[in-house]
């Protein structure tokens, strides 16, 4: 088939298969592959097997790689396997390595979802369901894009290698070791020319972007124990040093009301802001007022100034208090003195903050505050961290993705960064030694990790075309 | 049957039915009648029906009284009915009104239970299960005591009226109205001479007691909202005023590390400690070191002094931080910025703290601290409270219960108070205008509300005998 006709043909076949694409996403969303909850470990394994079947249907050779065990509270749980796929191996073509994840964040209807989170529902041209945009929609997007080439009888423009894991929402446990200590030595990355990840979002809701930077993540578990079991607050209240009041005291030392992190020296290694970087933010298409309204916040910090908001999402660290494990969390009036509580907080890391350095600062700070507290209870803190990532957005790979984006959306994409973290991005950059690119499918209001996560039908369908066009453009890059 | 032989005969029949008593408690525990969780509302109703059947089997006339609806988050849920029973109505006999509750606190094996919480298991002469001691064991104790009279062919020494509710662990919602606005005007209490409640515990593990005082409870729901939904901490971290940091700030203003309440004037109305009251604590059988070891606390407050510990359990208020609704509570590393969080804390009230006065102090204090915070988020606080209760322990009713206790345990019981709250106690005192007594069945280490709640087989079985002997002694009091 003549290349000149190829893209229109592919777009036509995508348009003809919309209902099938929705159906397949509904199937994927129905598997509650919640990686942070070991009770759903079987669902995670089921999800990996389901996707393996799909890769096999498009002709990929696949392999499930065992990545060992996870230790929780001293107990060992088997990690879900990582799905590896290889589709074609033509030495004349470029090879693209695609990464995606099959696991999701927890979700309960009672958290405030308007639909059942694991039953994909279409409302007003939006597909609601946990994982719809993060990351089951994009993962299926690759599958559909490849199928569209087959449907029109065209050759694939590139060779493909797939890495689909099911622990991304839980720190990608076991994946780094698989990539660096197994796949890399085995030569898996030798033929890889480009790496592409679609696990992120547009900045807003109308303009596409390509992402060249991510913040890292340093996550903390702060444990205080006052008794070996929970206690009745009537019987024991007034006669124990309560773990909760110690934990609340420590958590209150971390950040001020405007989001300024109070940990000593934590801003010290942040890359200085140059005049040239500063000017970049002015041209980005971003409306802070729309952003505020979308989440119904009363007021944004930093006076709601566009450049400040963008910089605090992308290039400055932030600290969030996520919650407390072991305390009462149910509705109603539970009268318990928790015996052991674990406070959860995390810092989003930016260039040039090193995870080891930040962990050390946090742990020293907590130890100092704990000593000041003078409580007889037991305190323990542990951390898990991943570095921030940036890439060169002037690379031909980014230009190819920009051409593909313009073909679909008739506008030049913003070159943007993101506040979130995808731990594997940095590892894939190191393992392959090649240019890594983040190509978002979903929109900025998709509410990944929140209630009512969705993907717009438009983003899903045009995203499939985008992926097909991206593969086409990368196929044209010099080998 | 001659009265002189009655008690030994009854004790003999109780000893012969131990396995049956355990079986019935296992049945009751198997119904997860968790009142604070509306998902278990059907189980609560089932539990009430189950108990209604048991009362009918002993010949009581019963009635289920509708107590209307409960509003949670603007939605209405039907409350479980209150079970009323009447057994005999001989004008020559005293009438005892028995109160108990059929609902339980939440429990999950994953909270740290060694057995399935809703499957009663015997280990080392202890019966483990949620509700075993609080309050299904004692409620069944009354049933078994009455049955024992029937088994030996003896007449009941008193008339009985029963009030069994299924919302005690959730503030006895709807019960006060039923008692004061329905049952009292209808004349239900006109014939009542004494009120007895068994919903409490010995102070320690060996010496029985009778309880003449309880602390009240003032429970607070402190809500902060920063966004209409939960947010991804990568995408939004640094660009919202987070509700969690505001809530943690407020919760940190309530109590210091030694348990001293920081709310302005909260100690002002506490009844002054007289020399004669002070001397009472010296003679109580209580070992702070055993108490500390039982919960595996590192160190007790108040230097672990016996009198101080007792006074802080019974006659001084305490404030406990219970937990946070709406924040991450699962194991693992959830990276969410909660949109709305509700902090839960409560104050145990003592004579002469009036709930309305304390609520006003707390709400004023929180409003003041909130103004100092200067956050743009929304804050709201609400309360539900019940007054502290004391009774005259020199009353003939208490002497009758003391004689019954001595008959079973061969020792004079301590006259004690308790740190916990049973909201209905005060209402029953008001509704009946009669002496109210708390007659504990369980031991001080039964761990009501905690993991591994249990009742000792000894306390359960001797408790049945105690209840039978108590009815006998009250039957001898002048009409």
Image (tube, coloured by chain):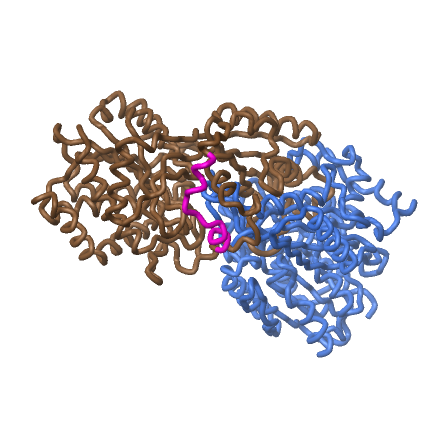
Chain colours: A blue, B brown
Q: Is residue B279 magenta?
A: yes
- Position of the C terminus of chain B, as image quadrant, is top left
Q: Residue at x 35, y 49 (%)?
A: B207
Residue A8: quadrant of the picture: bottom right
Q: On the picture, is A355 further left or further right than B464?
A: right
- Position of the N terminus of chain B, as image quadrant, is top left
> Does residue A367 sit above or below B166 in this rendering?
below
What range is drawn magenta here?
B278-293
Q: Residue at x 67, y 72 (%)?
A: A178
Residue A79: give x, y in percent of width and height. 57, 67
Residue A171: give x, y in percent of width and height. 65, 60
In this view, the residue in front, A16 or B279, is B279
Kindly tell me whether residue A415 is visible in this rendering.
no
> Does residue B183 sit above or below A252 in this rendering?
above
Q: Is residue B97 magenta?
A: no
In this view, the residue in front, B95 or A4, is B95
Farthest top residue in view: B185
> Does residue A7 sit above or below B394 in this rendering?
below
Kindly tell me whether residue A257 is visible in this rendering.
yes
Q: How many marks?
A: 0
Prevailing secondary structure of the magenta residues? helix
Q: On the picture, is B139 further left or further right than A72?
A: left
> Does residue B241 sit above or below A164 in this rendering?
above
Farthest bottom residue in view: A186
Residue B74: give x, y in percent of width and height. 47, 31
Residue A294: give x, y in percent of width and height. 66, 36
């Amino acid at each position: 088939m003549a290349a000149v006709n190829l893209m229109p043909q592919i777009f036509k076949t995508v348009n003809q298969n919309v209902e099938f694409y929705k159906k397949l996403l509904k199937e994927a969303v129905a598997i509650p592959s919640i990686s942070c909850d070991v009770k759903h470990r079987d669902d995670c394994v089921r999800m990996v097997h389901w996707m393996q079947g799909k890769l096999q249907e498009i002709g990929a050779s696949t392999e499930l790689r065992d990545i060992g065990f996870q230790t929780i509270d001293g107990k060992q749980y088997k990690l879900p396997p990582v799905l590896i796929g290889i589709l074609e191996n033509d030495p004349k073509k470029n090879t693209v390595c695609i990464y995606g994840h099959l696991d999701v964040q927890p979700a309960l209807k009672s958290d405030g979802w308007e639909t059942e989170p694991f039953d994909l529902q279409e409302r007003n041209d939006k597909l609601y369901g946990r994982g719809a945009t993060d990351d089951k929609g994009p993962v299926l997007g690759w599958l559909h894009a490849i199928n569209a080439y087959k449907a029109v009888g065209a050759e694939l423009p590139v060779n493909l290698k797939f890495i689909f894991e099911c622990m991304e929402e839980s720190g990608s446990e076991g994946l780094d070791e698989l990539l660096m200590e197994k796949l890399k030595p085995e030569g898996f990355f030798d033929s890889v020319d480009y790496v592409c990840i679609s696990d992120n979002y547009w900045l807003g809701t109308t303009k596409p972007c390509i992402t060249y930077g991510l913040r890292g993540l340093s996550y903390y578990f702060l444990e205080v124990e006052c008794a070996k079991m929970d206690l009745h607050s009537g019987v024991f209240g007034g006669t124990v040093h309560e773990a909760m009041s110690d934990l609340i005291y420590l958590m209150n030392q971390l950040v001020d009301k405007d989001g300024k992190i109070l940990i000593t020296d934590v801003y010290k290694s942040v890359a200085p802001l140059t005049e040239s970087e500063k000017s970049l933010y002015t041209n980005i298409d971003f409306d802070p007022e729309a952003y505020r309204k979308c989440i119904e916040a009363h007021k944004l910090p930093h006076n709601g100034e566009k450049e400040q908001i963008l910089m605090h999402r992308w290039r400055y660290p932030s600290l969030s208090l996520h919650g407390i494990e072991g305390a009462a969390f149910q509705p109603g009036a539970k009268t318990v003195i928790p015996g052991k509580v674990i406070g959860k907080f995390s810092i989003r890391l930016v260039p040039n903050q090193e995870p080891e350095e930040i962990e050390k600062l946090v742990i020293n700070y907590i130890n100092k505050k704990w000593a000041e507290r003078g409580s007889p209870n037991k305190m323990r803190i542990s951390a898990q961290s991943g570095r921030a990532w940036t890439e060169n957005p002037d690379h031909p790979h980014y230009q190819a993705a920009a051409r593909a984006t313009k073909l679909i959306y008739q506008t030049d994409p913003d070159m943007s960064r993101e506040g979130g973290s995808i731990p594997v991005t940095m590892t894939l950059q190191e393992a392959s030694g090649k240019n890594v690119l983040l190509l978002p499918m979903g929109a900025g209001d998709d509410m990944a990790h929140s209630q009512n996560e969705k993907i717009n039908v438009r983003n899903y369908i045009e995203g499939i075309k985008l992926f097909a066009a991206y593969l086409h453009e990368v196929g044209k890059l010099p080998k």
